[in-house]
Image (tube, rainbow, N blue to C red):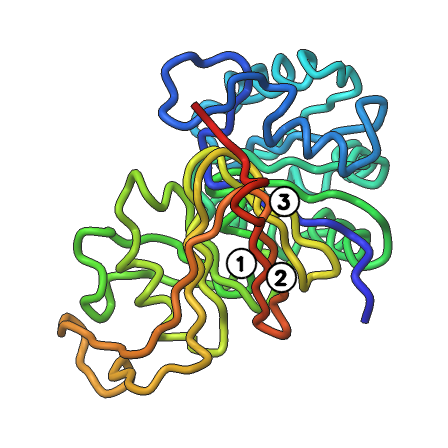
Amino acid sequence: MQIKGILIPIGGNEDKGIETKEKYHLEFIEEGILARVAKECGGCDKSIAVIPTASSIPNEVSDNYIKAFDRLGCANVNIVDIREQKDSENRQNIATIEQADCVMFSGGSQFKIVQKIGGSTLHNILSERYKNEKIVIAGTSAGAMCMSMEMISGGSGKEAFIKGAVRMRQGMGFIPNLVIDSHFITRGRFGRLAEAIARFPELLGVGLAEDTGLVIKNCNTFEVIGSGMVILFDPSEIRHNNEKLLNKGMPMSISNLKTHILANGDRFNIQERNLKVVPSDKAFMVD
């Protein structure tokens, strides 16, 4: 089936042209991830819906996105404020999602997104639109992690690769063949994602650095965007994986886990497991 929508998972801390102390940012917001989000949905005159459900400070987060998109010239930005399950059945919220050209999930807790939106009328409409229409679904941090079918719901990076250290649950199911983790470099989540992949070796693991994302088209090919790196775990050639043999709390081992380190402009075909990197003389540079 041809998927007409576009997914843009972001590793968190994307440059909004507001904060000045972020470790990873682009010099100009006009060259950054949010500008690409606006471009992919058809330009700054299109309708953008921001869902701050994951955040513990939804009003502040909503204001920041309104200001960030306004700096890009995007004035048609609406907030879909879902704080309870019943809000996902609210007719006005549903109408906003039905009309939006782009839906942006904020960071925070991915569990909140699934708990309050998953399985709702709003979720079902968004899923159908993603399959059949050219809509952009973007999400940062928790908003990126919730996109997968198998979702990391918690677990310490420091304890990871001890069996059971990572908690998994069903996500929003927009893309079935990836497991996505965010803030991957700054929070040391290598082991956390590796355990998730050991548990689900038929999937690809995607670790997104901050201010870094993917543009995923047809649920199959992606391009890296932003100023950081993407760590990609491909378990298709694993020779040893003892995850299913161990008791909870025991250290795990895995061998021949193929790992790619990707940067801005690199592309990957998920189905064919085929990588295309940007030539070194055309690489994106950040001071």
Q: CA distance from mark 1 to mark 3?
A: 16 Å
Residue 84 appears in the figure: no
Upstream in sequence: badge 1 or badge 3: 3
Check the image and report above or below for 187 versus 26: below
Residue 230, given in percent of the width and then of the height, sits at: 45, 49
Which residue is tagged 3?
Answer: 8
Q: Residue at x 24, y 51 (%)?
A: 156
Q: Residue at x 56, y 55 (%)?
A: 277
Instruction: Classify the position of the N terminus by image quarter.
Output: bottom right
Image marks 2 and 3: residues in contact by CB distance under 8 Å: no
Q: CA distance from mark 2 to mark 1?
A: 9 Å
Given residues 281 and 206, the one toward you in this image is: 281
Amino acid at dot 3 = Ile
Residue mark closest to the camera, 2 vs 1: 2
Q: Residue at x 61, y 17 (%)?
A: 68
Residue 124, given in percent of the width and then of the height, sits at: 74, 55
Amino acid at dot 1 = Gly
Which residue is tagged 2?
Answer: 175
Residue mark closest to the camera, 2 vs 3: 3
